[in-house]
Each structure stands twice: as structure tokens, then as C-alpha cells.
Image (tube, grey):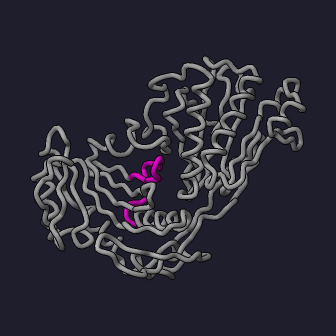
């Protein structure tokens, strides 16, 4: 065991993935297993921790900053805090029970730092206020890793380790999301968030639940995708429908770029269908397979008379058992390039399948850790349909 618990005491649920091509009744169990890491504390820095990681097998992704129960203690001591209505005085009173002390408000950036050695992680934390109402607190932020490792996979290991602890304390998260990979636990009064940043830093946050659309979710102000149960997602109707196919291609490339980059941070996989609402068999789809991105013009399986083999081959498609696919390897490392290529291929085949833009919808799922979330891509400008069971 790493951190005082045996691997057998915690079930690791590998991702389930629906076999592409719409062939009912077939599932792939397992696939690429979750990356499990042991984190070894190497050094301390004034504003965080420097950690190194080595890959482990059959062990929970925990390590010495977790092994010493520092992160778990932080989570457990903050969960019971009663922030009331999150007025600044209420927050200050609540955290004083932990011996934490807030400094003066920095009005130009609307936040208050904790006093040195009188806050979480030796004082490296802050409370953010509403710029229009400095007396209204929005969130309490603790930067738990400020000097991250260079390797993206190692940073992903850190984030998964923190998530694992959060699940032990709070149970399954309400929502996963990206632009910067995050998980949200929504609770009455106060919600909890763990996220990474593009530089690899890792934050733990307490959010005012009534205002958390400003930080993590429903209003779309954070990230390009969200995965949750349908009741926790925003409207399926796009705020601004896509104007033309060029815009669909551009927005699809943007969403793909982010999904490609974020996927390794999450213990699961995604699959997205783009189809005609009136004729669902005219569709294309894409999914991640490990670090690869796979795109498939599945509609030709159902409408083979529309498939021009010479043209498809020139465009980069390959046929296997009458299924036209293209695998883009290491999509995370070349996420922008592969995203543009995949978006162009998918949109071209939707048009060749005679799907009208006004009839185009998408459905998507994110599967892993025993969950099957609906996936929302708000930037596509397309209506979100209910995924097939």
C-alpha cells in the first residue's frame, strides 16, 4: 500500500468503451488501464511542493504529500466549514476555526491572501471576491502543487492522485470538465473543485455553490467541455447555432484539440457522434483509444452507395471490413494538428452523406471510474441529443 491502505481495499474501475460502428451488444472492457502513480516528495518550495513520480502497477495513485495525509487532512478539515452566504466576514469567521487568518483585501485584483504561516499550506492560499461587491466572497483557493514536473503524464498522475483522495472523502464527483482539466463536487452552500492549469499547477478550491457557474460549470465560462448527468448539464439547445459548415469545422477542431489534450488526465474515455436528426444512420464519430484519436465515417456502413473508395483513400481514410476509419496516433502530443485534420475529415464526410447543417446534432459520452456521463460541447453550436444506450 502507498499511504496506508492496500490496493485491494479500493476498486479500480477501468473504462468501458462502446465499440465504434454502431454494432449493438459489443463492449470493450478495460482498454488502456488508468495510469496509477506513486508520488515521492523530493523537496519543498516556499510556494508549494516539488514532486517526482514513478509509474507503479496495481497500486493506488497516492504518494508522500498524500502519504503524510496532508492533502486528505486539508480536504477533511475544510469540508465541514459553514461559509453561510459567503459574505467575506462569514468566510473569515469560518476559517478562523482552523487557525487561518486573512490579510487585507487587494482591491485591484479582488482577493485576500492568507497571512504568512496562518493559512493552508503555510499561508499559500487566497479568498477571491466579487469585483463588483468586495464583501461577497466567491471562492477559497489553495495551490497544492505550484512547481509541477515537466512531463504531462506525470502531471496527470498528480491530478488523478488528488481526485482519488477527493472521491474517498466526498464520493463520486458531480462533473468532469476541461479547458484545464477539473472535477467538481457540487454541494449545498459550498462546492469543491480540483483542477490543473496549463502550466501543470494543481489547485484545490471551495466555491460558493450559488455562484459556481462563474468558476466551474453551467454558464460555460470555464472550459470547452463538461461531462455530467443530464440534470447537471446546461440546456441542450446551443446559445448560438453554428452559421455554416466552416464554423462547424473550426469549432469542432477547437473542441477536439482540448479533448485530445485533456483525455490523459481523466480515468476514462470519450466518444462523440455527429449525425442527422432525421436519419440517425447518416453519422460519423470519433473517440480516444489510449493516447490515439480514432475517427470513423460510420454512415457508409449503412449507406455504402455513397462511399467513393478512391476519394476516401486520398483523404486519408482506410477501410477495414467495410468500415472507413483513420487513426491519428499520439493525439495529445500533436493535439492541434490532429484536431484540424480530424475536423476536416469528419465535416467532409457528413456533407458527402447528405447531412444538412440545419439537421445536424451531436451526442457524446465520457465513460470511466464506473460512471457514464453525458458530454457537453457548448462551443460546437449544435443541438445536443441524448446518447444511445
| Residue 85, visible in the rendered structure | no
Residue 179 colored in magenta in the image = yes
Quadrant of the rendered image containing residue 67 = bottom left
* Residue 354 in the image: above or below residue 384: above
Instruction: Depth check: give the residue in front, 264 or 62.
Output: 264
Quadrant of the rendered image containing residue 92 = bottom left
Q: Residue at x 61, y 17 (%)?
A: 358
In the rendered structure, the answer to whether residue 103 lies left or right of residue 340 reads: left
Check the picture and name the quadrant holding the C terminus.
Answer: top right
| Residue 119, visible in the rendered structure | yes
The image shows residue 157 at horizontal and vertical percentages of 52, 67
The image shows residue 132 at horizontal and vertical percentages of 17, 37
The image shows residue 386 at horizontal and vertical percentages of 58, 33
Quadrant of the rendered image containing residue 278 = top right
Q: Which residues are magenta?
A: 168-184
Instruction: Depth check: give the residue in front, 193 or 156.
Output: 156
Amino acid at each position: 500500500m502507498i499511504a496506508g491502505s492496500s490496493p485491494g481495499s479500493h476498486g479500480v474501475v477501468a473504462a468501458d468503451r462502446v465499440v465504434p460502428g454502431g454494432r449493438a451488444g459489443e463492449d470493450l472492457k478495460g482498454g488502456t488501464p488508468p495510469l496509477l502513480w506513486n508520488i515521492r516528495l523530493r523537496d519543498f518550495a516556499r510556494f508549494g511542493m516539488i514532486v517526482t513520480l514513478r509509474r507503479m502497477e496495481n497500486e493506488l495513485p497516492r504518494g508522500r504529500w498524500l502519504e503524510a495525509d496532508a492533502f486528505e487532512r486539508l480536504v477533511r478539515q475544510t469540508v465541514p466549514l459553514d461559509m453561510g452566504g459567503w459574505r467575506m466576514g462569514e468566510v473569515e469567521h469560518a476559517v478562523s476555526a482552523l487557525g487561518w487568518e486573512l490579510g487585507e483585501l487587494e482591491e485591484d485584483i479582488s482577493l485576500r491572501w492568507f497571512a504568512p504561516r496562518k493559512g493552508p499550506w503555510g499561508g499559500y492560499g487566497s479568498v477571491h471576491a466579487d469585483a463588483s461587491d468586495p464583501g461577497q466572497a466567491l471562492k477559497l483557493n489553495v495551490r497544492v502543487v505550484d512547481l509541477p514536473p515537466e512531463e504531462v503524464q506525470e502531471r496527470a498522475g498528480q491530478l488523478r492522485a488528488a481526485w482519488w483522495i477527493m472521491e474517498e472523502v466526498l464520493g463520486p464527483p458531480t462533473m468532469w470538465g476541461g479547458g484545464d482539466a477539473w472535477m467538481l463536487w457540487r454541494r449545498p452552500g459550498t462546492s469543491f473543485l480540483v483542477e490543473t492549469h496549463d502550466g501543470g499547477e494543481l489547485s484545490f478550491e471551495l466555491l460558493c455553490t450559488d455562484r459556481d457557474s462563474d468558476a466551474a460549470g453551467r454558464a460555460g465560462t470555464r472550459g470547452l467541455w463538461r461531462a455530467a448527468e443530464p440534470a447537471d448539464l446546461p440546456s441542450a439547445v446551443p446559445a448560438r447555432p453554428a452559421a455554416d459548415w466552416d464554423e462547424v469545422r473550426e469549432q469542432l477542431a477547437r473542441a477536439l484539440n482540448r479533448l485530445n489534450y485533456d483525455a490523459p488526465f481523466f480515468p476514462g474515455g470519450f466518444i462523440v457522434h455527429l449525425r442527422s436528426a432525421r436519419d440517425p444512420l447518416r453519422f460519423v464519430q470519433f473517440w480516444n483509444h489510449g493516447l490515439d484519436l480514432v475517427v470513423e465515417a460510420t454512415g457508409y456502413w449503412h449507406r455504402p452507395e455513397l462511399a467513393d473508395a478512391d476519394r476516401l483513400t486520398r483523404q486519408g481514410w482506410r477501410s477495414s471490413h467495410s468500415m472507413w476509419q483513420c487513426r491519428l496516433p499520439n493525439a495529445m502530443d500533436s493535439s492541434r494538428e490532429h484536431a484540424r485534420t480530424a475536423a476536416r475529415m469528419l465535416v467532409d464526410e457528413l456533407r458527402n452523406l447528405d447531412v444538412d447543417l440545419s439537421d445536424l446534432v451531436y451526442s457524446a459520452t465520457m465513460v470511466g471510474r464506473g460512471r457514464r456521463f453525458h458530454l457537453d460541447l457548448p462551443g460546437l453550436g449544435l443541438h445536443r441529443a441524448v446518447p444511445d444506450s
